[in-house]
Image: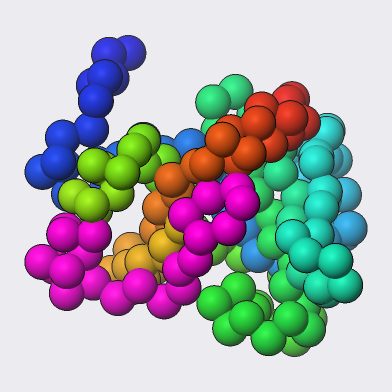
Amino acid sequence: MKRPDLVSPNAGLLGYRQFQMAYVTNDLDRALAILRAQYGIADFTVFSPAPGQPMRIALAWCGETMFEVIDATGMGIDIYDKALPDDFAIRFHHIGLEVADEFQWDCLQASIRAGNHVVDFAGDNDVARFAYVNAPELGHYVEYVLLHEQGRLFFESVAAN
C-alpha cells in the first residue's frame, strides 16, 4: 500500500496521518477485560494524566494503530463523559491524527478557521499540543496531536501487541 510521505498544507482536516482510535468508558477495568478477552489486545499501558485526578487512560499499540480507552468518570470533562450512559458502556470517541511539525500545525489552524470548525477542547502539556475538533457529521471528534519530545518517548514506551 502506497501512502503519501508528507501531508500537504491543503490536505483538509482528515489529511493527516491517523495513528489512533479512541474510546470512552465509565469502567476502565471492565472495558479492558472485554478488549483483552474478545478483541485480543492483551497488554495496555495504564496511567492517570495528573496525580489525584480520577481520569485514567489505557493505551495499546496494535500494529500501526494505537488504541486509547479513556475513563473520565467523575472528572467533569464533558467532552469525554457526555457520550456515556449511566450504566456500563464503551463508546467510540475520536480518531487521533498526528501533526508532524509547527508548519503543519499552522496549516491545520488555518483549515479549522476557514471551515468554521469548532475546537471543543485544546491544550499544550509536556507530552503534546492537541486539539479536539467536533465533527458532528462524522459522529465523533477528530483529535490533532503535535507530539513534543517527551511525548514521542512516551508513545514509544506504550505496550505493543
Rendered residue at 30%/76% (across/down): 118
Q: Is residue 40 visible?
A: no
State the residue in front, 137 or 158. 158
Residue 141 appears at what percent x and percent y? 42, 64
The picture places residue 51, in percent across and down from the top left corner, at 85, 66
Within the image, what quadrant is residue 87 found in? bottom right
Q: Nearer the viewer, residue 74 or 152?
A: 152
Residue 116 belongs to the span the image colors magenta: yes
* For residue 67, above or below residue 139: above
For the point 89% across and 58% down, which residue is it? 29
When asked about the image quadrant of residue 159, the answer is top right
Relative to residue 62, is residue 97 drawn left or right? left
Tell me: 12 left or right of 16.
Answer: left
Q: Position of residue 130 (x, y in %)?
A: 46, 57
Can residue 131 be seen here? The reply is yes
Q: Could you tell whether 109 is left or right of 119 in the image?
A: left
Tell me the quarter of the picture where residue 146 sits: top left
- Quarter of the image with the C terminus is top right
Range of magenta residues: 109-129
Query: Is residue 128 within the magenta segment?
Result: yes
Q: Residue at x 42, y 62 (%)?
A: 131
